[in-house]
Amino acid sequence: MHSRIIFLDIDGTLTEPGSNIPPESALTAIRKAQERGHYVFLCTGRNYGMLSPLLKYDFDGVIASSGGYIKCKEKVIFNCPMTIEQRIKAMNVFKNNGIFRTIECINDSYTDEEFKEFLRKNTNKGNNSELLRWREQIESSLNIRPMKEYDDQPIYKMVFMTDSEKRLEDPKKILGDEFLFCIQSKDKYGFINGELINYKFNKGQAIERVCEYLQIPVEHSIAFGDSMNDLEMMETAGLSICMKNGCEQLKKISDDVCLSVTDDGLYHAFIKYHLI
């Protein structure tokens, strides 16, 4: 039996979105897979600091910031923040176009308080009050701090939210040659969510870097994901499995679909593919 490398997205795959507590079945599957000689990596859009509640589960490594920061055990094998020029340009163009930003540094994350202020002033419109509660819960659980506390640390990734596609026209013109705009479909609140990711890395390239470092063929890798920010990961891995709770677009390009995260999907998939 050859060793496989299993790459797990977190939100919607290993845990329910915004949570830091995997189902016990998933932890059992991971532990048993490692005992059989397989490697298990987190592969996430979260920055490294947001992973601290999960690192106690002894993963073999982490791909953080959508591939911008990679650790195998305790060794950092890739580290690629924005340049100072890129950082200033991205921060300004989003702000100037009224787009709400959440920036992710190596350990800390910061978000525009103006977004919550906007929601508070418009809580009587549609689902804004529900969105406000959701945002505050996410920021609290992932320790995202107000933008006024940001102290010019290097930025690896930027998450953005806007109520208008038109607001993105300027940023795309200015940043489009250097960055991918990974747009999630308009959410149930009417806002467009997206991620600004450096073309120098993505989750797929990260899988290749880890496989090269561990000297295991890419075709022996397995990726589990649920949303379009997992696309490159799913396209690169030898086997791609989308969660049943995942988006329909990703299911179409995946090799298989497993049960939802709340229905012990990882555990049953690990059994199906003889990882445990």
Image (cartoon, rainbow, N blue to C red):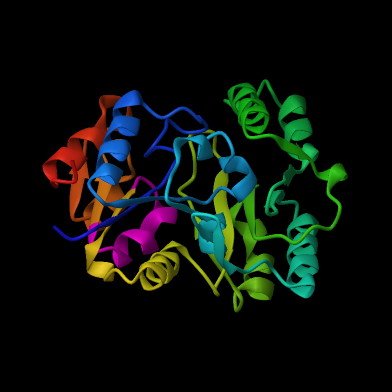
As displayed, is residue 110 above or below residue 120? below
Q: Residue at x 31, y 39 (%)?
A: 30
The kind of secondary structure the magenta stretch mainly shows is helix
Magenta span of residues: 225-239
Instruction: Tell me the quadrant of the picture where the C terminus can be found.
Output: top left
Is residue 226 part of the magenta span, yes or no? yes
Q: Residue at x 75, y 61 (%)?
A: 154
Please name whichever residue, 29 or 224, is drawn nearer the observer in this view of the structure. Answer: 29
Please name whichever residue, 230 or 91, is drawn nearer the observer in this view of the structure. Answer: 230
Kindly indicate the quadrant of the structure image that contains residue 16: top left
Q: Residue at x 41, y 47 (%)?
A: 9
In the rendered image, residue 10, in percent from the top left (x then y), is placed at: 44, 41
Q: Residue at x 19, y 40 (%)?
A: 269
As displayed, is residue 226 above or below residue 261? below
In the rendered image, residue 253, in percent from the top left (x then y), is placed at: 24, 58
In the rendered image, residue 71, in percent from the top left (x then y), is placed at: 52, 58
As displayed, is residue 136 above or below residue 271? above
Kindly indicate the quadrant of the structure image that contains residue 147: top right
Direction from residue 238 to residue 230 in the image, left or right: right
Is residue 20 part of the magenta span, yes or no? no
Direction from residue 156 to residue 199 in the image, left or right: left
Please name whichever residue, 134 or 49, is drawn nearer the observer in this view of the structure. Answer: 49
Direction from residue 261 to residue 199 in the image, left or right: right
Instruction: Tell me the quadrant of the picture where the N terminus can be found.
Output: bottom left
In the rendered image, residue 202, in percent from the top left (x then y), is placed at: 48, 66
How many numbered discs, if any? 0
